[in-house]
Image: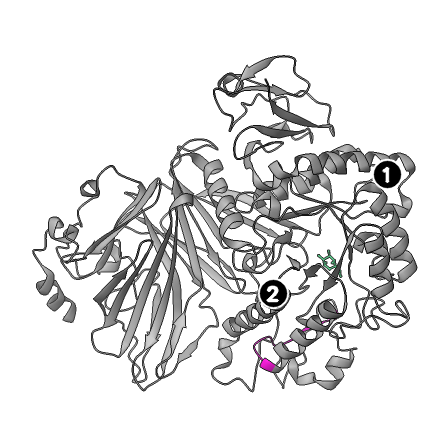
Amino acid sequence: MLKYGLINQLVNLEKKDFMMKEKQQYWILETKQCAYAFGINNAGILENVYWGKRLESQLDYPDLPESEGWASFNGPTQVLQEEYPVYGGMCFHEPCLKITFKDGVRDVVLKFESEKSSNNGLIITLEDIHYPLKVNLHYQTYSEYDMIERWVEVENLGKETINLERVFSALWHFPGGGDYFLSHLTGRWNNEFNLVREPLTPGVKVLESRRLTSSHHHNPWFLIDDGNCSEDNGNVWFGALSWSGNWKLTAEVSNFYTTRIGIGINDWDFIWQLKEGEVFSSPHAICGFSDKGYGEASRLFHNFIRDELIPHKNQIHKVLYNSWEATFFDVNEPSQSRLAEIAAKMGVELFVVDDGWFHNRNNDNAGLGDWWPDSEKFPNGLTPLIKKVNSLGMEFGLWLEPEMVNPDSDLYRKHPDWILHYPTRVPTLARNQMILNMARSDVQDYIFTKIDKLLSENNITFIKWDMNRNVSEPGWNTAPGDQREIWVRYVKGLYKVWGDLRTKHPEVIWQSCSGGGGRADLGILNYADQIWVSDNTYAIDRLRIQYGFSQIFPAITMESWVTDADRGMLPLEFRFHVSMCGSLGIGGNLLLWDEAEILEASHWISAYKNHRQVIQFGNQYRLSKEMMQYMSKDAEKGVLFVFNTGNNDTQSHNTINLRGMNPEVKYKIEGIQEILTGADWMKRELSFPLEINKSLFLEISKSK
Ligand code: GLA
């Protein structure tokens, strides 16, 4: 009944009151093109009223709907657009917060306490009406990208420990009705980032990871559209969670036909004991809106990631060579030197030695954890090879899998208790390895010290940070609190070590890999500049995987190698073109490539270098699944990739329109005689009939 008390307190407030600064009970967050509004309704409940295109005047935003009470079968969470619904009262929908207090009460009742705003930030503080519990809802706008970042802090102001059982970072409502479509990315190892679009129907659709990483299987990203949408037009609402561990997304259509999406740390097997005076901060979630379709939604994310997230913001990514698929574990100074010589001749700028270089690593049975050069393979350490690579004009990079340990390693023999495990269970091995408990400070110190030593003693400018298995037996019997805190403490430990290494060695570029794209999320992009998207390097598969990846991640983060997987099956040109759509790398066994292949490779590497500014930093337009256009930010130049994979739906002879050009500027498209203005090109129906397995890479240039 307490809630009815609150209704009476705030009843009769009118919108104009809300608009008055001093009252501060209706908030509008505006970005360049979009707006998000919520306020306190007459029942004292924080209610969302608007998320969409920015309106002309602040007075145009909708009033808070009156809360007139509810039927005995439906509480406010069912019928209102609660901004941050909690489990308490009559809440049968997916809540954002679920708590058990010390006395066993599992019911939260929050009331508005205060607000604090700055130019682009807002904090709404709510307090429980009985228990010493504070919830701060944080909002931060990124006007330029039409994005709003949200996260929450839960604070225990009392003496008794509070058990947090779910803390979502944000929940969003979609305007009027339930006819929405959800796009998301799904897959598995070797087949990541498949784009799925499906109608949402009454009930809850859950996407999640329980694997300790964000996972190959689902990505913590969503896009909602209202059914009238294309790459270029239509309303889209989208968001993502900045978190590299277990996460959960609930997309719910209510029986009142309203649609909402919540996102946050997964509450599966989760608990957090919030002790006296402690604050629990959720990961950040980011959301955006556009009325210009799927393509613009992606470009907003691309810009945001490039400008706000990745550590080396304006740095061109070098063309790299990675030796994994060439030599596997058979790594030594002579074999790598020979590869390096050929790579340098082709124009490669960064030579990366993958798995197999460290102590006792001859196959995947041993070595993980012992991060020093194997004395048989590298009798004089890595220095001679690095010097050789540098003398060839290339930088040097190295592969590491810091979170892992093999039973057959010096590290495990010394510290068997450092792995995630239950003492009464035999640890499940996957790829013959176990997971170090990154939540432990001694583990963090060990990893930091070993990598710091490698980076301090060697001229290494690039690290590929891998993680090649998912979790099992997530036990930690000496944990300071409940063992289920491991899911969060592990990720925080990972971020700490990686962050400390970045601070000490700011020049190093890191790549995030987890058997391909198993840890590709906004959280990891605070540390890594790029992502190894998939272990699947077949160019045709890669096109599909890259298409999905591009929904959220920009080309600069998309490391893509030309390998031998499809050598002899597809022309080298085709394989290069696919990899040139991202951050180009080469991963084939160059010792087997003939002179003609080396020559052709040099040609494409040089072409890529000429155009990579546009590919890595420009605007990307998905003309179809097989046609990608990139335009420089000033729309002065661009490139066009066309592929024919033989897939009936997407063949290159389907007509397309070019995009992203300046309507007034005249352009030339390589291979086409006419010179037209951007306006005319964008109207012109173009098709590029190609034979199956053929591709084109065309330059778009401004014409005098
Ligand atoms: C993972 C990576 C590969 C390679 C191997 C090495 O599978 O995705 O690129 O680094 O590990 O063991």
691 relative to 452, above or below: above
Q: Which residue is drawn at 69% across and 35% down?
A: 610
| Front residue (pair 671, 532) | 671
225 vs 348, left or right, is left
Q: In which quarter of the image is the N terminus?
A: bottom left
Element under disc 2: helix
Determine which of the numbered discs, if any, sits on residue 520 in the image. Answer: none
681 relative to 419, above or below: above
Extreme residue toward the top, this view: 674
Determine which of the numbered discs, if any, sits on residue 502 in the image. Answer: 2
485 vs 8, left or right, is right
Please state the quadrant of the image where ligand 1 appears: bottom right
| Front residue (pair 388, 695) | 388
Give the mark nearer the N terminus: 1 vs 2. 2
- Residue hosting label 1: 598
Neighbour class for label 1 at 10 Å: few (<14), some, many (≥20)?
A: some
Identity, as a three-letter code, of the amino acid under mark 2: Arg
123 relative to 340, above or below: below
Was residue 435 drawn as part of the magenta stretch in this picture? yes
**Is residue 74 among what the camera can see?**
no
**Is residue 659 among what the camera can see?**
yes
Q: Find the magenta span and give its range.
A: 432-441
Name the main secondary structure of what is drawn in magenta.
Answer: loop
Identity, as a three-letter code, of the amino acid under mark 1: Ile
Residue 413 image-quadrant placement: bottom right
Q: Do the residues bearing badges 1 and 2 touch, measured as CB atoms within 8 Å?
A: no
